[in-house]
Image (cartoon, rainbow, N blue to C red):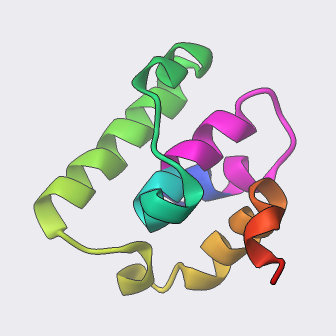
Amino acid sequence: MRRLIVIAKGNTGQSRSVADFLLAWWNAGSCGSFDMTTLWAVDGAITDDMVAVFRLIADRHEYPTAYGLGPDFEKIVAEWRPELLKN
């Protein structure tokens, strides 16, 4: 998961795809859902990490805050969904 967070905070060709995936977990209603065809744009190692997180979500029934990741996800929101921070 840590690697996905680093990628989502970055500015690579795959960063947006990873951010979209993570933010759908954070709050799909506000941040948007995840289009599964987005997986076509990420390499195999990143896809494997995303599958592991997907499995964690399915098994644990917890949001990122349960893992102390709130501040990281807030930074991802600021980078990729800045309009959500405006009042």
Q: Residue lying farthest left?
A: 59
The answer to whether 3 appears left or right of 57 in the picture is right
Query: Which residue is drawn at the image coordinates 53% and 78% (left, top)?
Result: 69
Rendered location of residue 6, percent (x, y): 70, 55
Rendered location of residue 81, percent (x, y): 75, 59
Which quadrant holds residue 17? top right
The answer to whether 49 appears left or right of 15 in the picture is left
Query: Which residue is drawn at the image coordinates 42% and 40% (left, top)?
Result: 50
Query: Which residue is drawn at the image coordinates 35% and 84% (left, top)?
Result: 66
Q: How many marks?
A: 0
Q: Residue lying farthest top?
A: 40
Rendered location of residue 83, percent (x, y): 81, 64
Vertical position of residue 65 compared to residue 24: above or below: below
The answer to whether 16 appears left or right of 24 in the picture is right
Q: Quadrant of the C terminus?
A: bottom right
Vertical position of residue 40 compared to residue 16: above or below: above
Q: Which secondary structure class fits the magenta region best?
A: helix
Residue 37 lies in the magenta-colored region? no
Numbered range of the magenta stretch: 6-21
Q: Residue lying farthest front?
A: 87
Rendered location of residue 34, percent (x, y): 46, 39
- Nearest to the observer: residue 14 or residue 38: 38
The answer to whether 76 appears left or right of 43 in the picture is right
Residue 19 lies in the magenta-colored region? yes
Vertical position of residue 37 compared to residue 28: above or below: above
Query: Which residue is drawn at the image coordinates 17% and 55% (left, top)?
Result: 58
